[in-house]
Image (spheres, rainbow, N blue to C red):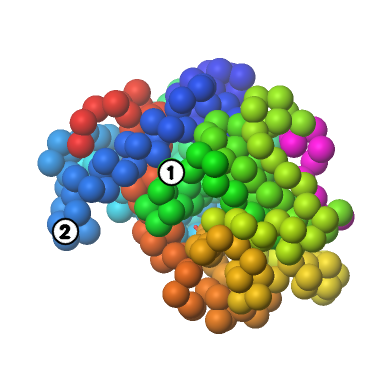
Amino acid sequence: MSLADTHSHFLDLADLADGELRRLLDAARVRKTARAGKPKGTVDDDAPLAGHLLAMIFEKPSTRTRLSFDMGMRQLGGQTVILNQTDMQLGRGESIADTAEVISRFADIAMLRTGPHETLGELAAHVHIPVINGLTAYSHPCQIIADLMTFEEHKGTLAGQKLAWLGDGNNVALSFVHAAAQVDFELALATPEAFSIAPDEIDAARAKGAKITLCETAEEAAKDAAALMTDCWLSMSDDPTEAEARAKAFTPYQVTQSLMALGDDPIFLHCLPAYRDSEVTAEVIDGPRSVVFDEAENRAHAQKAIMLHCLGMLDMGA
Ligand code: CP
Ligand code: NVA
């Protein structure tokens, strides 16, 4: 399977066919509703992935992605194995190609969290099973399904709503740009020029119909927004020696109560982990408009939809 043939992989939202993101959001919601109130370890009634094994490879740390894929796969009736790079021969120089062949013999579906997007591409090119992007330095597509799902739970339909991104034009922000080309909402981006999203990404999304506004200030982005969203100022793949310069550049984009007051009764979204009083004040993230823990929980419901999509079972009932 080549990287170009992304039919069953889940590498980026930009690869999805028309309507697929909507179907993923609907499936995540339906499955969440169907198992409401059950203990978390209970398998869904239909157990659609019984007999399937998910292999997760982590080359970077994770709390939510690890928990949500593990719990999600178990709820679908399947099983999981977690591989940390430091415990694998991959960490001692075994090739990605050989690792891909071996994983394909043992698992039915794989997930990779890594730094370079090229590593994900190489794995996807060599496996014989679907691969899911569990975050790279370039993008974080799984996150955005949980985020949009959470938005719809709290604010209703996305159409006609303005969602504001403040701060770093990073992997999460880029996946929002990709999403804006798939479902109908306005994405207002306020990022410092040095940390903005590549213009060709914005152009490509706009060419597919995305409504993206590039704002000069955080205030302009926040005005009348239904959600304010941000992320940490130093991502896992960023150079830690840049921390101070980044903090200086991003301080005007900190999500504060006064920024929230400019919105239209906005919710606050953050993929987590969060750093209080850096990208967001404690008052906002711990306040009544913050839905970050619903967002974290929804990662599991989103992952379930993604795995079913990869295995061609998305439209099966819950
Ligand atoms: N939001 C997110 O991906 O969290 P983790 O890094 O904990 O997986
Ligand atoms: N932008 C962050 C997201 C963490 C979930 C990072 O890449 O570290």
Magenta span covers which residues? 194-202
Mark yes or no: residue 90 visible. no
Label of residue 256 in the image: none
Q: Which residue is mark 1?
A: 157
Amino acid type of the residue that numbered disc 2 sits on in the rendered structure: Gly
Residue, disc 2: 37
Residue under the point 65% across and 41% down:
177
Q: Earlier in the sequence, mark 1 or mark 2?
A: 2
Distance in Å between CA atoms under marks 1 and 2: 25 Å
Image coordinates of residue 252 in percent, x first then y, are 78, 70
Q: How busy is the neighbourhood of tag 2: few (under 14 within 10 Å), some, or many (20 plus)?
A: few
Vertical order, 197 against 1 (above or below): below
Tell which of 302 and 224 is nearer to you: 224
Q: Residue visible at 74% across and 36% down?
A: 202
Q: Nearer the viewer, residue 314 or 47?
A: 314
Query: Can you give x and y, in whole percent of width and height, for residue 191 in the image?
Result: 77, 56
Q: Quadrant of residue 5?
A: top right
Q: Amino acid at mark 1?
A: Thr
Q: Position of residue 269 (x, y in %)?
A: 53, 61
